[in-house]
Amino acid sequence: MGNDERDDAPELDDPSAVLDAEDEARQPPRKRGRKDSIELIPSVPGSWPRFDSPPEPVPQATSASPALLDMRDRHMTGDFTGALAVAEAILQRQPDHAEARRCAENCRRVLLQMYSARLGPFDQVPKVIVSREQVRWLSLDHRAGFVLSLVDGRSSIDQILDLAGMPRLDTVRVLYTLLEQRVIALGARS
């Protein structure tokens, strides 16, 4: 090590000198006195821009309820079914909750598009492809049982949606589930 380097290096015998050098390295450029840094402190007191009123506080994610955070996370990750369930639970407690209402509407729209795309054209006619005995052993809830009772082999998906009297998303979801479970098959209108 040359003489010039020794002058800049902290004395190893003095531990506080090493700590001071490390602290200085962590400081922003203007604190270390670099000439190429921009000085952010106004040279004239009171030269900062003035506002007539203080800016609106930014809502912090930590101030949101766990249910609201869960809804946001599920929606952002594409779990629209889960986000819809959480949004509906929030709306049961707080019917006027704007964010939960927007999320629920968005989830319903996206889910309806997804199930509709999987089912295909709504002019197709669903037909039951399992025997009555097998239907008895299926674990269908009351909604699925009702929608299945509307599948007569002549009515199109559109007609079943009209007859069901249930929310469109619920009916389409049930039809898709029955199709996936191979309880019904879709065919062209005869």
Image (cartoon, rainbow, N blue to C red):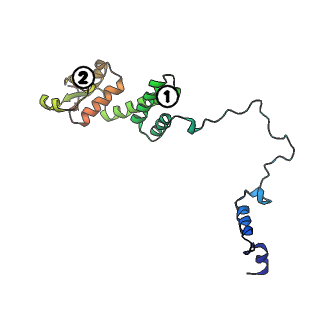
For label 1, the residue is 102
| Circle 1 residues within 10 Å: few <14, some 14–19, many ≥20 | few
Quadrant of the snapshot with the N terminus: bottom right
Q: Residues within 10 Å of mark 2 (few under 14, many from 20)?
A: some
Name the secondary structure under disc 2.
Answer: helix
Q: Residue at x 21, y 36 (%)?
A: 182
Distance in Å between CA atoms under marks 1 and 2 = 30 Å
Residue bearing the label numbered 2: 146
Kind of residue sitting beneath label 1? Arg
Coordinates of residue 146 in the picture (x, y in percent): 24, 23
77 or 86, nearer to the observer: 86
Left/right of residue 31 with respect to residue 71 in the rendered view = right
- Residue 122: image quadrant is top left
- Residue at left offset 79%, top offset 38%: 49
- Give the side of residue 1 with respect to residue 88, left or right: right
Instruction: Locate the C terminus by quadrant.
Output: top left
Name the one closer to the observer, 51 or 25. 25
In the current view of this chain or complex, which residue is farthest to the bottom? 2
Asked if the residues shown at circle 1 and circle 2 are in contact, with their CB atoms under 8 angstroms apart, the answer is no
Drawn side of residue 157 relative to residue 106, left or right: left
Q: Amino acid at mark 2?
A: Phe
The residue under the point 70% across, 60% down is: 26
Residue nearest the viewer, comparing 100 with 11 = 11
